[in-house]
Amino acid sequence: MSAVRLYWLDPNQPDGAFPDPNLALKEPNGLLAMGGDLSPERLLRAYALGIFPWYNPEESILWWSPDPRTVFETDGVHVSRRFQRTLARNDYAVSLDRDFPGVIRKCAALRVHREGTWLGPEMRAAYQRLHQLGHAHSVEVWRAGRLIGGLYGVARGRVFFGESMFSSQTDASKIALIWLARQLRAWNYRYLDGQVGSPHLYRMGAIDLPRAQFLDAIREPAPSATPESAWSFTIDAPRNRAHLEKSRRTNTSKTD
């Protein structure tokens, strides 16, 4: 039996090259490299190759590029008749980049409670830095001024890499995903990345895409309509002021 081969990335060389994603392991699917750091330079180079970090805080950084890749086509998110009624209600509001720190903190808190602590302080700080640089973005769902759901991720080429989501009320994360997909479609993005498949993602319309096809979409230039820094909705998304008003007063930009 041959030994598992993982590529080592020097943490002192943030501009160092990644190995070819096609060299990633088949089992566990997509594991490619370890080591390195979470500097903006390294992260942006990784995403340009369809590679993302996923590891527990006490471990070395692990880098992944699964094949196939589970994605949503931006016009392919399934909305059931029941959920169409939920979306049409005037009992929530959605926003983009209104509270990135709040979204990532709530995503981390949810993971600690349910799955462990992989979204640790180092990861949160790294993505907040990418957000400050205009590469990472969040979508928020509000009710009565409270942040009840959302997700965050990174935009590269014509792909939005969804990293994590949370929901503190029923269907709130699904609302965030659907409105984000609609806005991405309006901006001419091709895919919303879900990384690896799950029954929940497939029920919502996710598909498995060969790695090569996924990488082609990343290599395409970013859509010209995409804002250069903070994002905001340009489609007719729910902005009920009664749900957003309090959030301006209670929103915090506190970082970890």
Image (cartoon, rainbow, N blue to C red):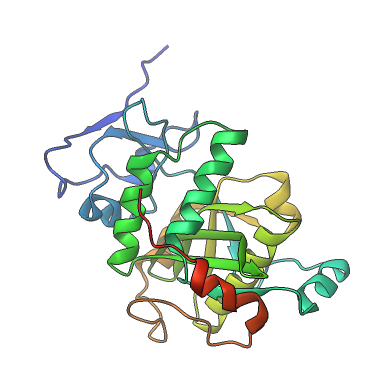
Residue placed at 50% from the left, 35% from the top? 29
Q: Is 13 located above or below residue 98 in the figure?
A: above
Q: Nearer the viewer, residue 12 or 45?
A: 12
Residue 205 visible in image: no
Front residue of 108/201: it is 108
Q: Position of residue 5 (x, y in %)?
A: 32, 24
Residue at image coords 81%, 73%:
84
Please give the name of the residue rendered at 68% of the width and 66% of the height, measured from the top-left corner. 175
Q: Quadrant of the N terminus?
A: top left
- In screen coordinates, is 165 left or right of 88? left
Picture coordinates of residue 212 (x, y %)? 44, 55
Residue depicted at x 38% and y 48%: 124
Q: What is the residue that sits farthest to the right in this orientation? A: 82
**Residue 197 appears at what percent x and percent y?**
62, 46
> Total label count?
0
Say if residue 198 shows up in the picture.
yes
Image x and y of residue 161, in percent: 46, 59
